[in-house]
Image (cartoon, rainbow, N blue to C red):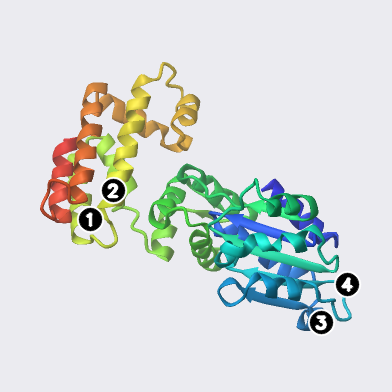
Amino acid sequence: MERIKEIVGNIDQGKPKPVYFLMGEEPYYIDKISQYIADNVLSEEEKGFNQMVLYGKDTNVDEVISNAKRFPMMAEHQVLIVKEAQHLSRAIENLVSYVENPQPSTVLVICYKYKKLDKRKKLYKAIQKNGELFESKKLYENQVSEWIRRTLSGKKYKIEPKASALLVEYLGTDLSKINNELNKLIMVVPEGTQITSELIEQHIGISKDFNNFELKKAIGEKNIPKVARIMDYFAQNPKDNPFVVTISLLSTFFTQLLQYHGLKDHSPGNVSKVLGVNPYFVNEFMVAAKNYPMKRVSGIVSGLRQLDLKSKGVDANNLSQADLLKELLVQID
């Protein structure tokens, strides 16, 4: 985030770099930075003659260089944005001659999604010297809830940990998708509101009662009737509740529970740090540890691995989701 603030700050001060190479696995920040440059380097009057967008599928490096060498018309800069530039990966090193001596009045933005430059090559070193090289890294799943909290805080909203966890479970780690859903939500919820699981259910359509986090909590509490109800709901709605997500989350939970049993310090702060979970969920491990001794947890982890393989067709004949869930219930009972 500090790096992004620095990039934005230079643009706001009227000091854009001649080359921005935005690369990496997380497209969200690549889109955000390139859009900020598109919106803020030129005035609306200047954009007509001095702002151009090319697409990697429809262009080549020579055309990019040719356009980058143009002079602006009645403006201090021209902006050239190359979107989906990863399609130019085979010839991207040919940019090095331009980057070593870039046109000072051009702001060239290369959006190189899902790929990275080789640090050993000349282009990487030339961009570091004469431009701005930004790597947009994919967030780990346990980092996304904090990202949601910060994003909403910047818009003067709060969110309860359970609601944040629901979003991550339902939408995964795709920041663009999460941001779109958050924007829809804040359009109908007053500023200053704390986002709850009820609001998530009402406006985004995620069930607050029948989801993997409620299933995990019920399993930890050994609330078998509730576990059975949730599993029955999953069996009836397999498309919205794929077994692969359920088995993955429960495997992670019991692996973390095994770690919890091995800890000498069970203080909430230490458990949160070592297991990489929000402090809000630490109590679930304390409860589950009482219901599942270490030896039992070890057996469940092994059983879940076998069940995961069965769900993928190993030593099993296309078991239905209902059958897999029944086996899951037997594993954790």
For disc 2, the marked residue is 246
State which tag comes first along the sequence, 3 or 2.
3
Label 3 sits on a secondary structure element that is: helix
- Please name which of the two marks, 4 or 2, marks the residue nearer to the observer: 4
Q: CA distance from mark 1 to mark 4?
A: 59 Å
Q: Is residue 69 above or below residue 191?
A: below
Please tell me which residue lies in front, 112 or 187: 112
Where is mark 4, residue-wise? 76
Residue at the image point whose x is 87% and y is 76% from the top: 75
Q: Mark 4: which amino acid?
A: Glu
Determine whether label 2 and label 1 are within 8 Å by CB.
yes
Q: Which disc, if any, is residue 45?
A: 3
For the residues labelled 3 and 4, the Cα–Cα distance comes to: 12 Å
The residue singled out by tag 1 in the image is 234
Q: Could you tell me residue 268's position as x and y percent?
A: 46, 27
Q: Label 3 sits on what residue type?
A: Glu
